[in-house]
Image (cartoon, rainbow, N blue to C red):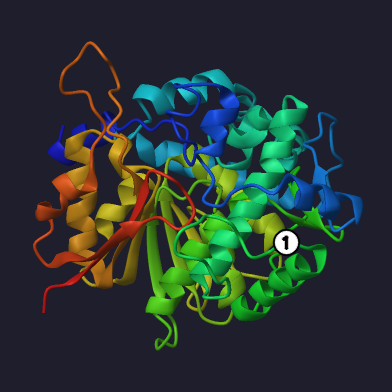
Amino acid sequence: MSRRTDALRRLGRPSRGVRRNEGRRGSPSSDRARMLFYEPNPGLRTDLIRAGVLKLRLPTAEAVAVPSGALENAERVRAAYRSAAAEAIEHPGSSPSGQWDMLIARSYGDLTRALEGDDVQLLASTLERMFSSPTTAGLSMGGEVGYLSDEAGRDFYVDWWIDGLYCLASYLGLLREAMDTAKSPIDSVASFEALYAAVGERLGVDPGFPDVCGAWGIEVHGTLVPRTSWRHLHAAHAMLDETASLRAPRIVEVGGGFGGVAYWAERLRPEAIRYAIYDFPIMNAVAGYFLLRALPSSSVVLHGEPAAPGPHIALLPSWRVFEEPDLGADIAFNQDSLPEMPREAAVQYLEVFDRVARIGFYSENQEDAHPGDPTVADSAQLRLPDLDHVMRRLKRASRHRAWMRRGYFETFYRPET
């Protein structure tokens, strides 16, 4: 077994996008309050809900209707999954393990059985409600359902959503802030609506999310905007800012989740973006189905399908990233996974990023260094600053606290010369 394959065999990821230390200290409400960048304004929240500007759409427990065209999407996803499974035989160390393996075993059984079975209607039904069910446990919306169990949690979710909007607006330069307080200048329904409109205008797209796959979150005048969209929009916008001068930028992402960043990258530059996601086959099934449903007029290429010459999003199994050509991407991207990998696997991905990225490598990851096993001295999660010396061509150019999440850092690595 090769060193590369052996490292992949031991790669295990916990729930992505969900802080592992939430709720460990103090009361749930005090822990949640520390997640916010801005002081919550319960009065404004109430006014926005009463005025009909905001409405919390809860995840549905009901089975959802499957559009006829979605059956074709499910068939493509199943074919890609089986193609990757057959190829995985040649890469015996590429299967999920550790905490990610346990998460799949605990929550993804229905999806695994549907992918391996012959009932396309069942597979489409399973994927069509992915965001409201355990099918996406650990992936953004799926990991946020727990906040909705009581009234206090639902109020927090709305406050957290508003906080995300403020963070994105601040990143875009649209929100003024005092030097000595976390209070937002937004204090009325009118100023809130003006800010929301300004964010969409600055981005150049409506922040609305496609009403597919059981998506839930906040409705703004009836348009759905999940909280997770704010951070995915930010990541996509930041990378496209870096590639603004390029006619057809190419982004390579390792660990794409349900495809949220790729989705917004396509929405922001639909005529140009070329995006490759490398992940476990079962995760590519989730992302592939979502992207096919969310972007019906765009080119989404699944494993085993012919390559697309123009703008497209491709989903490939994780072991294929090592086949990326030298300088074959403009940006390499990782979010929510490098710290949770075994060191050998993280080093090998960093070596790939160092080799393939023309403009640089963009990371948004946590640095909790939480021990995987408290009884094992060296089981702490990795910290990227302790590993960036692995890259010889790319050097750390900037590092700052993440705009959207406490305990996360955004780091950009560029060619040294």
Is any atom of residue 79 visible in this view? no
Judge from the rendering whether residue 410 lies leftward or rightward of residue 55; answer left or right: left
**Nearest to the observer: residue 62 or residue 292:** 62
Quadrant position of residue 295? bottom right
Instruction: From the top left corner, tell me how far across and down residue 115 is, in percent.
Output: 61, 33
Judge from the rendering whether residue 331 lies leftward or rightward of residue 110; answer left or right: left
* Picture layout, residue 72 above or below residue 117: below
Residue that carries the numbered disc 1 in the rendered image: 187
Instruction: From the top left corner, tell me how far across and down residue 246 is, in percent.
Output: 40, 86
Instruction: From the top left corner, tell me how far across and down residue 282 is, in percent.
Output: 51, 37
Quadrant occupied by the C terminus: bottom left
> Which residue lies at the image location 49% right of the left edge and 68% below the top edge?
171
How many discs appear?
1
Residue that sits furthest to the front in the current view: 180
Q: Secondary structure at mark 1?
A: loop
**Nearest to the observer: residue 315 or residue 348:** 348
Judge from the rendering whether residue 98 lies leftward or rightward of residue 5; answer left or right: right
* Picture layout, residue 169 above or below residue 112: below
> Which residue lies at the image location 75% right of the left edge and 69% below the top edge?
191
Is any atom of residue 33 visible in this view? yes
* Picture layout, residue 9 above or below residue 280: above
> Which residue lies at the image location 60% right of the left edge and 28% below the top edge?
29
> Which residue lies at the image location 69% right of the left edge and 31% below the top edge?
153
Q: Residues within 10 Å of mark 1 (few under 14, many from 20)?
A: few
Instruction: From the top left corner, tell me how far across and down residue 324 is, in percent.
Output: 28, 62
Residue that sits furthest to the top in the current view: 375
Quadrant occupied by the N terminus: top left
**Amino acid of disc 1:** Asp
**Nearest to the observer: residue 78 or residue 165:** 165
